[in-house]
Image: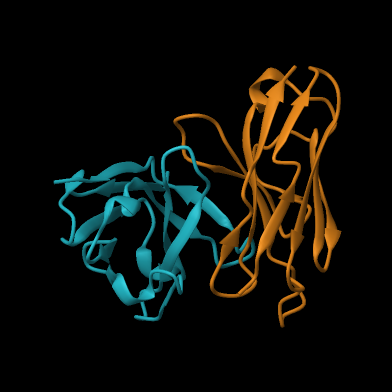
Chain colours: A orange, B cyan
Amino acid sequence: DVVMTQTPLSSPVTLGQPASISCRSSQSLVHGDGNTYLSWLHQRPGQPPRLLIYKISNRFSGVPDRFSGSGAGTDFTLKISRVEAEDVGVYYCMQATQFPYSFGQGTKLEIK
Amino acid sequence: QVQLQESGPRLVKPSETLSLTCDVSGYPINSDCFWAWIRQPPGKGLEWIGSVCHTGTSYYNPSLESRVTMAVDTPKNQFSLKLSSVTAADTAVYYCARREAQDLWAFDLWGRGMMITVSS
């Protein structure tokens, strides 16, 4: 089974400053079809998660361009170029390359 | 507009079976694989429970596999979760979600979630 490990688990950031979250998988997430099914989700308190990024670096519909994803194989990164107040919450990476699907532990983004 | 809505009893007694249904509106359930259940214990992270396709194919989290059954009801456009022999550790918010299968292969649609409490 694929284990997803996120760092840091907590990230205090200043409004307007960048933020970065890392996600590492215990196995390569490259699927047999050549795609890498690594996604990022954001969850605000009391709400369901919402999709931000799919297939490493593709922004989902309506996601601001200050969010970007990168990486390959087993190492992935989510970056926010300039943090806004609405970005607080918990960020999860998730792999759908192989069953059983798995999530990272989550990274809590807080404003300093 | 595609929407997912969970329903079912919010309180389940220990050792009994938790049963939830996810109603899918605005989208034919037999147009995609896979439909998923994901849960989140209070104050904790997300746990994938399993995924099911309208063809009958299903995959479950190995840690729950012996207690989980999922199914799709195509005429009703809904899918279901049954979790047997529940304990307090199964207390969580339960979400249903769609894993888009054409391009994204990610959970792009989520229900609002239901808080399920296991208690006598």
Q: Is residue B120 above or below residue A74?
A: above
Residue A57 relative to residue A92: left or right:
right
Which of the 4 quarters of the picture holds residue A13? top right
Taking the spot 72% from the left edge, 60% from the top edge, the residue there is A55
Question: What is the x, y in percent for residue B76?
Answer: 21, 62
Taking the spot 38% from the left edge, 74% from the top edge, the residue there is B65
Question: What is the x, y in percent for residue B90?
Answer: 33, 54
Question: What is the x, y in percent for residue B31?
Answer: 43, 68
Question: What is the x, y in percent for residue B62?
Answer: 46, 74
Question: Which image quarter is the C terminus of chain A in?
Answer: top right
Which of the 4 quarters of the picture holds residue B70? bottom left
Q: Nearer the viewer, residue B32 or B87?
A: B87
Residue B37 relative to residue A26: left or right:
left
Taking the spot 29% from the left edge, 50% from the top edge, the residue there is B88
Query: What is the count of numbered marks?
Result: 0
Question: Which image quarter is the N terminus of chain A in?
Answer: bottom right
Q: Is residue A27 above or below residue B29?
A: below
Residue A112 relative to residue B86: left or right:
right
Q: Is residue B1 above or below residue B81?
A: above
